[in-house]
Amino acid sequence: MLVIPAIDLKGGRCVRLTEGREQSAKVYDRDPLEVARAYEKAGARLIHIVDLDGAFLGAASANLQIIKRINGEITIPIEVGGGLRSLADIEFILRDVGARYSIIGTLAVEQPRLLKEAIAAFGDAIVVGIDARDGQVATHGWTEATRVAAIDLAREVASLGVGRIIYTDIARDGRLKGPNLETTREIARQSGARVTASGGVGSLDDIARLTELASDGVDGVIVGKALYENRFTLKQALRAASTAK
């Protein structure tokens, strides 16, 4: 299983949210570039970066220049999300910033036609982020509830050609009390896409339990707050993911 360390940026600083609430942001006084370098040194093969200002504002922010610098100074690929609401936004992230993957959330719900165009233009560089509360998708930086079921959206985007989905249970995000294993499994089973689990990982046991879903199509996990809070190191997480049975 691929362990993907996360860097969430707000105002140019590393932060973590609880349950996706903007006002819950906890600032970690660490240089994002140094964090990325440390993740690479520890053995990460991909880094997950979110422009939280972009997610909440619905437009590109100054964080993108930091992300571009990160990408230019590490050798491993990055995936970037947050406020990408048009084909131009996606192209900028992939071609100007240099990200390997562009994470689409709100656009996938509100403009499936544009999602289809993005897949035609950029192929497997398009990843869909499905963020949900009580099984229902939330959009616009998790601030707006919809009546769209997460599993239904997963099926729809997979039918359009999306190969990987990042599923986040918002109620668990930042809580460090474990991921939503059942829904993560169902998202993978029902869609047939590869699924990256996100939200709630707080222990090495959580990672071990997620590896048991590999046969269902869950092949990655994003880890954020647990690393900042020193629950375990990235090296320990990578070891847990590779040795669990």
Image (tube, rainbow, N blue to C red):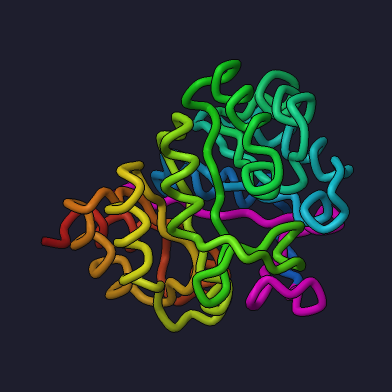
> Taking 118 as reference, is 8 above or below it?
below
Q: Position of residue 78 (x, y in %)?
A: 56, 36
Of 53 and 32, which appears nearest the observer? 53
Of 152 and 107, which appears nearest the observer? 152
Does residue 15 show up magenta in the picture?
yes
> Taking 187 as reference, is 207 above or below it?
below
Q: Residue at x 34, y 43 (%)?
A: 194
Residue lying farthest to the left in this orientation: 245
Does residue 11 show up magenta in the picture?
yes
Q: Is residue 223 visible?
A: no
Q: Residue at x 36, y 63 (%)?
A: 184
Q: Residue at x 53, y 44 (%)?
A: 47
Is residue 109 toward the left or the right of residue 51 in the image?
left
Q: Is residue 87 visible?
A: yes
Residue 148 sits in which quadrant? bottom right
Q: Position of residue 206 (x, y in %)?
A: 32, 73
Q: Which residues are magenta?
A: 1-26
The chief SS type of the magenta part is: strand
Query: How many labels were placed on the picture?
Result: 0
Is residue 38 toward the left or the right of residue 3 in the image?
right
Query: Which quarter of the rendered picture does the C terminus lie within?
Result: bottom left
Is residue 113 toward the left or the right of residue 57 in the image?
left
Residue 103 sits in which quadrant? top right
Residue lying farthest to the front in this orientation: 147
Q: Position of residue 228 (x, y in %)?
A: 57, 69
Residue 209 sits in which quadrant? bottom left
> Taking 139 as reference, is 85 above or below it?
above
Of 139 and 48, which appears nearest the observer? 139
Q: Position of residue 96 (x, y in %)?
A: 75, 21
Q: Residue at x 55, y 31 (%)?
A: 126
